[in-house]
Amino acid sequence: MKKPVRFLVLVPDGAADYPDPRRGDLTPLQAARTPNMDALAEAGVCGRAVTIPGKLPAGSDVANFSLLGYDPCIYYTGRGPLEAASMGVRLGEGEVAFRCNLVTISMGRLEDYSAGHLSTGEARSLIASLQERLGSDGVAFHSGVGYRHLLVLRGEEFLETSCLAPHDVVGRPLEEILPTGRGAEFLRDLMERAGEVLENHPVNEERRRAGLRAANGIWPWGQGRPPRLPSLEERHGLSGAVITAVDLIKGLGIHAGMEVVEVPGATGYYDTDYRAKGVYAARSLEDKDLVFVHVEAPDEAGHEGDWEEKVRAL
């Protein structure tokens, strides 16, 4: 009996980059030692694809829609609702989900989009305090992983608020980068009140004593309502699984009707367990037609401007 064809999609998120004139005009991907990717390329077919079509924002959310075969021009509705799905947060009528970073603000500028990559345990305590102090019938904070969290607001005017991705505006004055448009006044006020809650929180006092950056601000962005996706089975006749540590990709998998495989040691950062992801991917291929394996480390290195770390991640 002929074995069914299986598909393995390996995504080194953020692998692409610009040549660095200080390093012989090499990109991190060109400089990295990649024998496994080289072997796959030699045994397969290479080509190009447009993963960020039209005027859509160049981000992991849009690109991974494309990689899974969903035209983001049709299906993309924002990052926030995908992460809400991963966290098990169901959006009610008129509710809008924002990605909510815990950030470091200093001297009137956005200093760090990740608050020094604080731990999930630290972040959980901060988000709980925000919900206790600022949560209401129309405002809800939900804890995620590391610096990545969720803010749900009631009011479809927030779909029209212009919010910048924090990793794109590090170092800039706040007055240049705060939300604008409909709903912005409420959002700015919420950000200010959140800063007051966080500034002297015990978690931040302890981080300062340890010489670490304080998570003294929130940064809502990437908002939207849930997308309406046909499942992978409906679209391609394939069963699927997704392996990732990132809520964004988990949520995309959930909306695509794929199984989300939890891998011990998968962190979404430089210290992720690559071997464990490979082992679980191989197991998943035993009963799934397509397995989508997402690695976040190169993308984090890119956001931090760390060329050497991106080379190591690749």
Image (cartoon, grey):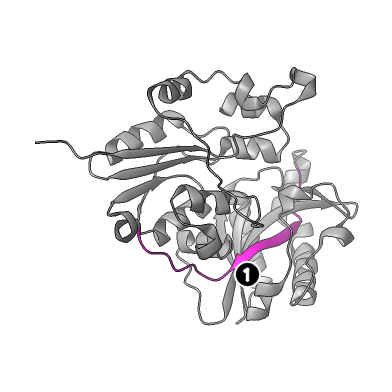
Looking at the rendered structure, the number of numbered marks drawn on it comes to 1
Helix, strand or loop for disc 1: helix
Relative to the observer, which residue lies in front, 307 or 188? 307
Q: Is residue 27 magenta?
A: no
Whether residue 201 is visible, yes or no, is: yes
Question: Which region is colored magenta?
Answer: 213-231
Q: Position of residue 90 (x, y in %)?
A: 47, 72
Relative to the observer, which residue lies in front, 10 or 151? 10
Q: Is residue 163 left or right of residue 125?
A: right
Q: Quadrant of the C terminus?
A: top right
Tell me what residue is drawn at x 60 percent, y 82 percent.
Answer: 137
Relative to the observer, which residue lies in front, 80 or 181? 181
Tell me what residue is drawn at x 71 percent, y 38 percent.
Answer: 304
Q: Position of residue 162 (x, y in %)?
A: 74, 67
Q: Quadrant of the N terminus?
A: top left
The image shows residue 77, relative to residue 2, as above or below, that is below
Whether residue 200 is visible, yes or no, is: no
Q: Is residue 225 magenta?
A: yes
- Residue at image mark 1: 131
Most extreme residue toward the left is: 1
Specify the amino acid type for callout 1: Gln
Q: How many residues crowd mark 1 within 10 Å: few (<14), some (14–19), many (20+)? A: some
Q: Position of residue 278 (x, y in %)?
A: 38, 32
Task: Give the image quarter of residue 13.
Answer: top right
Q: Is residue 28 left or right of residue 190?
A: left
